Amino acid sequence: MGTNSNTLVKLKNAGYQQNDKWLVKGVSLEVEKGKIVTLIGPNGSGKSTTAKIALGIYKKFDGEVEKYTNKIGYVPQKVSIDWTLPLRVRDFMVLTESLKEEAIDEALSLTGVVHLKHKNLGNLSGGEFQRVLLARAISKKPELLVLDEPVQGVDFTGEIALYELIKKISEELNCGILLISHDLHTVMSATDHVVCLNGHVCCSGSPSDVAKNNEYKALFGEQAAQTLSIYEHNHDHVHSNEGEIKKN
Amino acid sequence: MFDDFFIRALVAGIGVAFVTGPLGCFVVWRRLSYFGDTLAHSALLGVTMAYSFEFNIAISVFIISSVIALILIQLQRKTNLPGDALLGLLAHSSLAVGLVVIGFLTFIRFDIMGLLFGDILAVTVNDLIIIWAGGSLILLVLKLIWKPLFASTVNYELAEAEGLNPDRAKAIFTILMAAIIAISIKMVGLLLITGMLIIPAAMARNISDNPQKMVLFSIIGGLLSVIIGLFSSLEFNTASGPSIITASLVLFILSLLKIKQSIQLKN
């Protein structure tokens, strides 16, 4: 992976430790314009941490981060909003950037929640709130979108539609997307490059390559991979419960 | 026109209310009321410094409050004590040290009640200039940092990820807090300044559904409190600070009635 003018963000051997425990270590990846990179992995595998390193939320990290854009849209995994703040959807949309009324409506229409524009943010359902979060992130027409479990709490048909929308956005805006998901199946069709994490990079490549990979199967179970591939090869390591690597 | 002490107090109070309105909203949103208290308590030390070195009170209070805020940030980084314990430590020790220093300054006659609860008789034309010039400056700076400060109040990570530099906004906001305490200490007194910040904002929260509205109502609430409070202070010969805060409490209670009404309307 050589750096070229299309690179938006690049992690070189990045890691982050908290209270002397490595949350994630040795991650190298690159997000380019118009490409979707998906991070998959089980709970606690360091997906969100990796995204936060890339975004600059964590200041004291290991390794290197090169960022070539400041136009970033972010959908965090957890957003806890303090209800001492009276906040409507409309106010939330212009949180980090001033937008014209049409731009707000356009983004909210894309994610199907324009009717909620004047509702109080605290009164939304989980799925509705998620759609508002996504609308806010795309409304500023970013060059880099970082989406951490963007469809959580959204119903199944909505989920597929939103992934299609994400794909469409990456094509229309020619923006790079760093997508985090625990489910490879739903993101299969949209993604260009998959990085499978479990405290470190287990495997990476195209979605079908990763699905064929034994470490992916070991993490997600045979069944997850079965429909995609029967390809097999040998493990070179397994994981202990603490996520440490033990060589075979 | 400013010859009359009451007119001076009124003009000063109105100037203060314009600034405490928006700042108070952030104090409520960011849960900083005890932080405001700590800065206000440390103001006593600032006042004694001003008397000792024959220095301007507002500037002296501003410097001491800023120093206390810096010490707090350092203590938060270097100790394992919880934030509220550190705030209590600084608030009471700076108040105590301030009172001890007053004990040593036997050559000056102090009006302690005036310091603690405000004294409208003490407002000079000079104070008016400081309140209006300082207040305008505070509002201008607040306007400049509004976006990052507000965004990080809603969600720190969003603000940081999308490049708004929330840490800088927070540091500047801390200085603004020290500044508002410095300019309003003569009016409201150091024990009640936080009330002037919080109560109109709390009242505004009860009747607002968006942040702009809450700021606007908070300013209006502060202005009404000052006007009603000062007139009753004159009428009943009470200290200005408690009168203003009592007026704001009455407004807060009225705003609760509005909530009750709107709940009944919904049902």
Image (cartoon, coloured by chain):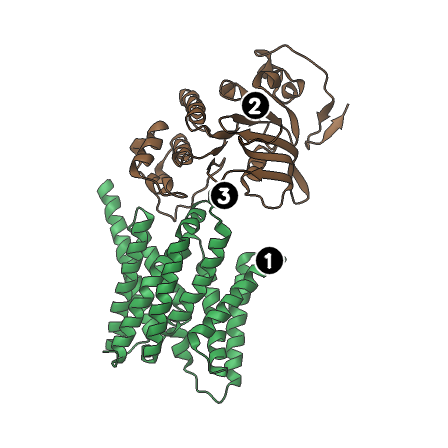
Which type of secondary structure does the marked residue at label 3 adopt? helix
Q: Amino acid at mark 3?
A: Glu
Instruction: Tell me if label 2 and label 3 are in contact, CB under 8 Å.
Output: no
Side of B5 where A124 appears, left or right: right
Q: Chain of mark 2?
A: A
For the residues carrying marks 2 and 3, which lies nearer the camera in this image? 2
Seen from the viewer's position, the closer of residues B208 and A247 is: A247
Q: Residue at x 45, y 48 (%)?
A: B152
Q: Amino acid at mark 1?
A: Leu
> In which quadrant of the rendered image does the C terminus of chain B lie?
top left
Q: Which residue is mark 1?
A: B81
Between the residue at mark 2 and the residue at mark 3, the CA separation in whole angstroms equals: 26 Å
For the residues carrying marks 1 and 3, which lies nearer the camera in this image? 3
Q: Which residue is mark 3?
A: B157
Between the residue at mark 2 and the residue at mark 1, the CA separation in whole angstroms equals: 46 Å
Q: Which residue is mark 2?
A: A193
- Colour chain B is painted in: green
